[in-house]
Image (spheres, rainbow, N blue to C red):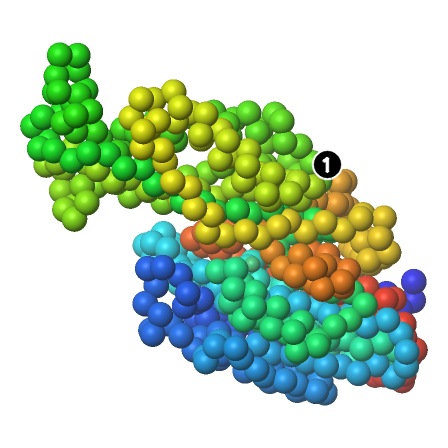
Amino acid sequence: MHEAERIRDAVAQIGDELAETLAAAIRIPSINPAYPGVDRESVLGGEGEMARFMAGIYEDLSCETTLFHVEEGRDNAIGYFRGYGDGRSLILNGHHDVVPVGDPSLWTEAEPFEGKVDPDRVWGRGASDMKGGIVAQTYALKALQLAGIRLRGDLILESVSAEETGQYRLGTGAAIERGVRADAAIVAEPSGPALLAVGPCSTGLLVFRMQVTGRATHAGMRGSTIYPGGDGYDLGVSAIDKGLLLMDGISRLENQWSRSKRHPFFPPGHFTIMPGVIEGAPVGARIPYYVPDSFAVEYVVWYPPSEEPEAIKQEIEGFVDALARTDDWLIAHPPAITWVKDTPGASLDPAHPLCQELLEAHTLAARNKPEYLVEPRIQGFLGAEETIRFQQAGIPAINYGPGDIRLAHAANEHVMRDELVTACTTYAIFAMRWCGFDMVKTTI
Ligand SMILES: [Zn+2]
């Protein structure tokens, strides 16, 4: 296809600039300030700086540009590029907040916010998740302009805050509430490990906290609380022992899920119930000289988008309840479960034109690059992301982006430059065909 070739040529011309712009974006440490354990005041404002950085690029590309925020310092940027006619409109969306760096000593290839560019990759926090995606989306418009392709429908670029902590009302949700809508949206979360796979669905996410109480006494009475002939539960009960008993059971449920919960677009065993944070100690004294009377654990639950969150909650609560009824202390002192996060999985019919046309655009972009054409081309996103927010607002949405979720939230995060270029080419070809176009005279 003649126009697709022009786009491939145009992206090849601006590929180095794309990588350098991504590196400049990485140098803005836009850590999400809402994480427990992150010093909010010291990182607040990074997201706003990233929004202004992206807005500057949108303006250079002749977009009508809007900056807005729900929370001070946590701005979002939107660039409207008006089509000349009545073609279908398209939103290209991504988030510019990043997760904390973790243990800095593990960053052996580059400093997290150095923005190092190598011949084959760009290093730094946010390279994969997902500054690489938003810069590639933005450069798709640049490539279209360079290739002399005029869009009939509107192209809307969105760079939003607050995704990593699931505060979608401050970012993508706020844009939807302002009335920013289109006939389709593509979110640029990293498609890897399935290289630039098209993602019509994502994993459902639930987080719960389970608390167990015990009975405190002097640690020297441990034997009397657990062995026959001692004072038993009348004297003391370790909440940690009881919590671990429940956790052991829940890990067996997780193991069952690896066989019972399946979805055609997710690898076997993807749906899990993982403990992520544990606290156990005597109430009011964080020392081991008591039999500890408090225990709490937070779990992250990944479930198939085809299942309802209420059914998953009931399944887990029912399992824990049955488990607790096997223990005489827990019968009288049942564990308390609190659900603290609920993000349903996204699900778009793979036969939808958005999915099919994106597959076609990818195939055109990756022509002569067999590594990008390995089947299956469709893969669910392995975490939670924001296509669900568009879908809930009646906007068909899908995920497709450069990078790899295995590198996101990890040390030495990076993105391959060829993936940036290929994704950028796909976005541009897709926008051209989705929005409709005509050609203008150019220099290339
Ligand atoms: Zn992300």
Q: Residue furthest front?
A: 332
Q: Nearer the viewer, residue 364 or 185?
A: 185
Q: Residues within 10 Å of mark 1 (few under 14, many from 20)?
A: few
Picture quarter with the N terminus: bottom right
Q: Residue at x 13, y 12 (%)?
A: 229
Q: Which residue is mark 1?
A: 264
Residue 21 position (above or below residue 351): below
Q: In the image, is 419 to the left or to the right of 274?
A: right
**Residue 222 picture location, percent across and down:** 13, 25
**Residue 377 picture location, percent across and down:** 76, 45
Question: Is residue 168 among the parts visible in the rendering?
Answer: yes
Residue 200 position (above or below residue 274): below
Q: Nearer the viewer, residue 9 or 26?
A: 26
Q: Residue at x 81, y 64 (%)?
A: 430
Q: Nearer the viewer, residue 353 or 417?
A: 353
Per the image, label 1 sits on a secondary structure element best described as loop
